[in-house]
Image: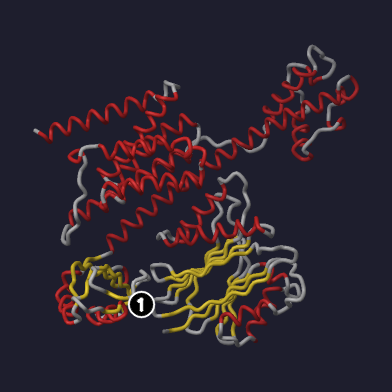
Amino acid sequence: MKKKKNLWFARIIIILFLGVSLAQLMLDSPAVLSAVRALMYLGVLYAGFTYGAGAGGSVGAVCGMLETFHQENLTPLGIFCLMGVLSGVFRPLGRAASSIAFLCGAVGIGMSYAVDYLTASVFEIVAAVLLFFLLPQELLKKPQEKHSGQNGLEKMQRQRLKETASSYGRLAQSLQSLESRERFLSQEQAAQAIARASSIVCGGCRLCSLGKQDAPKEIPSLCDDWQEKGRLTREDMPEDFQGECRRQDLYLETLSDCLDSMNYEEEWRGRFFESREAASLQFREMERTLNGIAQELDETVDVTARVERGVRRMLRRRRLKMEQLLVLEGAEARKEAFVTVSAASGGCVTVKELSESMGKTLSRNLRATDSGRTVVGKEPCTIRLVEDTKFRLLSGVARAVKGGEELSGDNFSCHLLPDGRMMLCLSDGMGSGRRAFAESELVTELLEELLEAGFSAERAISMLNAFLLVRKEQRPATLDLALIDLYTGQARFYKQGAVSTFIRRGGQVLEIAAGSLPIGVDCGATPVCVQQCLEDGDMIVMVTDGILDSLNGTDKEGVMEEFLAQNHADNARELAEQVLTANWSADMPAKDDMTVLAAGLWKK
């Protein structure tokens, strides 16, 4: 009886939610609109926490579309979808964790894309979270604990991920199917501008063809002249206008203003459709990411039951108490272990010793991830252990700032990703100085965060490109990315607007050629990708265009290859310094920002 009562209560809440949401389209009262937004945020949070990320994202998409129609802006659609997904992802951690993730999602995407919208919606978001905490516990489905052997639950979760990915794909397809618009003024729009200028200046005058109702035949040539020069002169106008019009200067000024105004409207319309394409791309990438997660879950096997007995016996010998254990075997039979342990009274074991003992038990060479903990004490702690890599990569950087500038417009990143790949990234912002530095810093930091979160390089670059395109001011930057798998030595090089990368192997030098447009120029631009198998002792040299421009001769890449072939430095920092000073010295001002990122691959 109680369950039926709760079910009817939930249905009443949903009906009220849909009713007031539809009322948003008909009422303009600020108080009503504020209440509607608060209820929509509450519905998204409730759906995500109760039914999971898929339901939260779907309800968020519906609410976002309602708000998008009302605001005439695509930003609410992304905010609602992301908040719904986050509230569902963190549901196993409880109501507080889902609410915090919900708030963090709103603040994160709001600060990045729409500060004004976030500021205006703070009250509604906080009110929704407070109402969510007031909901009775029996109305919320408590997230179930995951136990080993719950294959049915895992299969259902994978299926929900795939369904959510499919919904994002349909959203992307619907956005792409909308009608596209031309970026330049058409002859019809030019005729409207001429008619508008004639109504303002000419009045009832009919001395020339521009004052008549029929569109003058000179419109195509007038459009070409205006788009080429940005203004119109007497020589561009029809002959009868030059001979008969008594207000030529006023008419030319008015017509130019009308054309400029109409072109301004077209430019903003074009920016809207660029934003639409970027949103479509984001949904498409979200679909691929969720499908990738589902596929990874399909390929991952829980082997805890096979090894638990041996691990317990080993930990008992080390005077450690095991509280929880999870051992997973993923692609290429690589093992990953999560063990929650505590030391017996008065004892302690280092994390390194624990890693070695676990490795012997599992017949793998394991290492602990960087969690900041070095010793296992009496308080229980969870240690994540992954298979150690076959190679190590040591890097070094040398830089020079353009003469007269305080900051270099180049930025770099060397970062070890959780999956055992090393990320090497160089970015050259457009121009030099602080603005160029800010652009290249944004590219490297966002790319690092996306790859850290598990996005593939292609998806991360695509999302970064879309983000740069929808900003108010478009300032492109080059992207030079290398991802080296430290397990196998396989490397992938991605280039957008960057110069060549060089690999020195003994006395030979391989060139990874440049290509493609810089990032942030075209929504459909894709990076050049080259795959290369690296060997023990290979040296990678990545440079910005300032380095190649400083070399003598016309074949800059050939000069660099010859220099590296004759160079025998094995230290990455020394090699970077020698490349930087190959044809430049510190006592002379640099003509452009110059950065060298060198790295050496070595077997452990």
Q: Residue at x 26, y 49 (%)?
A: 94
Extreme-left residue of the structure:
1
Label 1 CA crowd tier, 10 Å (few <14, some 14–19, many 20+): some
Q: Position of residue 539 (x, y in %)?
A: 55, 80
The vertical placement of 528 against 332, above or below, is: above
Q: Which image quadrant: the N terminus?
A: top left
Left or right: 277 as drawn, with respect to 64: right
What is the quadrant of residue 194 in the picture? top right
Q: Nearer the viewer, residue 579 or 506?
A: 579
**Does residue 141 appear in the picture of this structure?**
yes
Q: Amino acid at mark 1?
A: Asp
Where disc 1 sits, the SS reads loop
Residue that carries the numbered disc 1 in the rendered image: 388
Left or right: 45 as drawn, with respect to 70: left
Extreme-right residue of the structure:
243
Left or right: 494 as drawn, with respect to 266: left
Q: Position of residue 79 (x, y in %)?
A: 43, 42
**Does residue 584 appear in the picture of this structure?**
no
Q: Residue at x 28, y 72 (%)?
A: 335
Q: Residue at x 26, y 68 (%)?
A: 381
Extreme-front residue of the structure:
346
The vertical placement of 202 against 84, above or below, is: above
Q: Residue at x 72, y 66 (%)?
A: 402
Q: Position of residue 396 (x, y in %)?
A: 56, 77
